[in-house]
Amino acid sequence: MLNNGLLLKRDVAEAIKLTPSHTTTLARRLRESGARSLVDRRQGQKQEYRVPAPVNAELVQQFAVDIITSGKTSGSKISTELKERCKYLLPVCSPCAPSAQIKGTRIEIFASAGGAG
């Protein structure tokens, strides 16, 4: 109805809770390419996590514990707690470190935790 001029862009945008600009973009895509152009084509994660599943579970658990108990957390705090509790040696990443430098990091598991680094 927007493309036919029966409704105003502002009214449609408000009804579907989008900006008028985004509404215009979607209306143009619908007009030019049909309804399939509006389907969300995002896909999930492209690769496995860079840490083993048990370590990832511990990271998530420790994050949740920190948030629940103190309302905040940090990478260095999680790293320290997992090193003490599970004998995992996690690299501490600076929040401003470029992701390209973080991507190749490896988590070493102490021999006492049953893994080989």
Image (cartoon, rainbow, N blue to C red):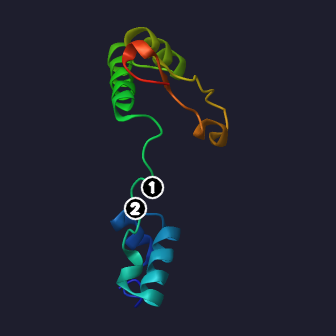
**Disc 1 to disc 2, C-alpha distance:** 8 Å
How far across and how far down the image is residue 6, in percent?
37, 87
In the image, what residue occupies the spot 42% across and 79% down?
37
Question: What residue is shown with label 1?
Answer: 46
- Note whether 4 is above or below 112 in the view shown: below
User: Three-letter amino acid code at disc 2?
Assistant: Gln
Relative to 77, 57 lies left or right: left
How far across and how far down the image is residue 11, in percent?
39, 71
Q: Which quadrant does the N terminus fall into? A: bottom left
Q: Residues within 10 Å of mark 2 (few under 14, many from 20)?
A: few
- Note whether 3 is above or below 102 in the view shown: below
Residue 88 placement: quadrant = top left
Relative to 70, 77 lies left or right: right
Is residue 87 visible to us here?
A: no
In the image, what residue occupies the spot 42% across and 83% down?
30
Question: What residue is shown with label 2?
Answer: 43
How far across and how far down the image is residue 79, in percent?
49, 18
Is residue 116 visible to us here?
A: yes
Q: Are marks 1 and 2 in contact (CB under 8 Å)?
A: yes
Q: Residues within 10 Å of mark 1 (few under 14, many from 20)?
A: few
In the image, what residue occupies the spot 38% across and 10% down?
85
In the image, what residue occupies the spot 61% across and 36% down?
102
